[in-house]
Image (spheres, coloured by chain):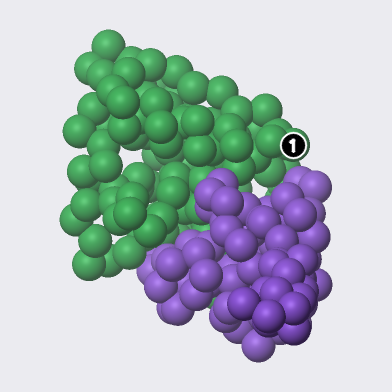
Chain colours: A purple, B green
Amino acid sequence: MNATTQNTERDKKTDEVEILVNNKAVSVPKHTTGAEIKSRAGVPAAFELFEVKGNKEEPVADDDKVTVKEGDRFIASPSLDPS
Amino acid sequence: MTEEQAEALADVEATFREHQVDHEELDDGAVWVIVRGVALGDGWNRDVVDLAVKLQVTYPTPPPYPFYCEAGLARTDGNVFSPTQSNSVDISDGVARTQISLRIQTQERFDDGHETLGARFVAVIAWLRSPQ
């Protein structure tokens, strides 16, 4: 592996952070989207995504651009039907 | 408490770190899981509720349903949404509660491979904050 390849690999790694989705650790790019977070977490694309901020859960749309930091918390859940 | 119930409770506690989460084990093996002090947002006659669900001893079958909060929950504008229309039910324990009827219609077993109980609570709270 040459130096350029090593640098690229290292840059790619440092651009990734570990967040929690449904209380499980998931590695995502620092600058990501709602859809990518769901994809990396392995949850169905149809699930709704929420970012946990203190005692509030704020919806994150698929195409929302999100900048995350280590330990940020997200919840993915299906839409529920009235019954 | 079964292993599945204990894992679900631990997940709710991890999801709602900023809240008090209580549980109560019943003689038949069911477990109440209660998230205290959930803020509802505008339009309800209560600012906060204690949101609860009863996990049967067979959990994750059936899925967690229905959810409950204090009796008498209503919209301040008089609108009635079907999931909260039963706002004074007694499930044979002498306690009146509002039933929150939200679920995945086709689901017979909780999909704990993808979903968690904490996430299900969040979905119910999201509906309460933006009912339709």
Q: Which residue is mark 1?
A: B18
Closer-to-camera residue (A22/A71): A71
Q: What residue sits 33% from the left and 50% below the top? A: B112
From the viewer's perspective, is B42 left or right of A44?
right
Task: Identify the image quadrant of the N terminus of chain A.
Answer: bottom right
Task: Residue type at mark 1: give it.
Answer: Glu
Q: Is residue B113 above or below residue A14?
A: above
Q: Position of residue A5 (x, y in %)?
A: 68, 81
Tell me which chain the residue with mark 1 is part of.
B
Closer-to-camera residue (B6/B42): B6
What residue occupies the far bottom of the structure in this picture?
Answer: A63
Q: Position of residue B132 (x, y in %)?
A: 55, 74
Q: What residue sits 60% from the left and 37% below the top? A: B14
Q: Is residue A60 above or below residue A75?
A: below
Task: Identify the image quadrant of the C terminus of chain A.
Answer: bottom left
From the viewer's perspective, is B110 left or right of B6?
left
Q: Residue A59 falls in which quadrant of the image?
A: bottom right
Q: Position of residue B73 (x, y in %)?
A: 60, 48
Q: Residues within 10 Å of mark 1 (few under 14, many from 20)?
A: some
